[in-house]
Image: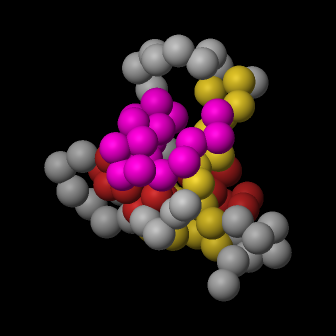
């Protein structure tokens, strides 16, 4: 079951925007990801679990080192369709 917004927010066991998480606590489903050697990769893998499509928002449509591109690469490797949107 997702929160009022109908979205899930996956929070890494690493530094993150705690204020944003607090603001969304009552309107989104907050999922705390477990700690591990690569907490952002763990978060990204959890976000993709069971997904058929990843809707990704990037600054440009060519690779640059970032969390969003890590997620895109994990999705592609898993055979998940990627709907990329440049913002």
Do we see residue 73 in this rendering?
Answer: yes
Q: Which of 26 and 67 is in front in this view?
A: 67
For the record, the magenta segment spans 68-84
Image quadrant holding the N terminus, namely: bottom right
Q: Looking at the picture, how far across and down is residue 87, in whole percent? A: 75, 24
Relative to 23, residue 16 above or below: above
Q: Please state if 8 lies on the left or on the right of 63 as rendered.
A: right
| Residue furthest bottom in the image | 1
Q: Which quarter of the figure has residue 83?
A: top right
Q: Which of 80 and 2 is in front in this view?
A: 80
Name which residue lies at 46% across and 16% down. 64
Membership of 81 in magenta stretch: yes
Name which residue lies at 66% across and 60% down. 22
| Residue furthest right in the image | 4
Q: How many marks?
A: 0
Q: Looking at the picture, how far across and down is residue 28, in whole percent? A: 71, 69
């Amino acid at each position: 079951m997702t929160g009022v917004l109908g979205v899930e927010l996956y929070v890494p066991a690493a530094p993150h925007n705690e204020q944003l998480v607090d603001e969304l606590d009552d309107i989104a489903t907050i999922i705390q990801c477990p700690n591990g050697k690569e907490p952002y990769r763990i978060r990204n893998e959890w976000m993709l679990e069971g997904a058929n499509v990843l809707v990704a928002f990037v600054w440009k449509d060519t690779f640059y080192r970032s969390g969003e591109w890590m997620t895109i690469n994990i999705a592609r490797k898993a055979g998940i369709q990627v709907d990329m949107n440049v913002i």
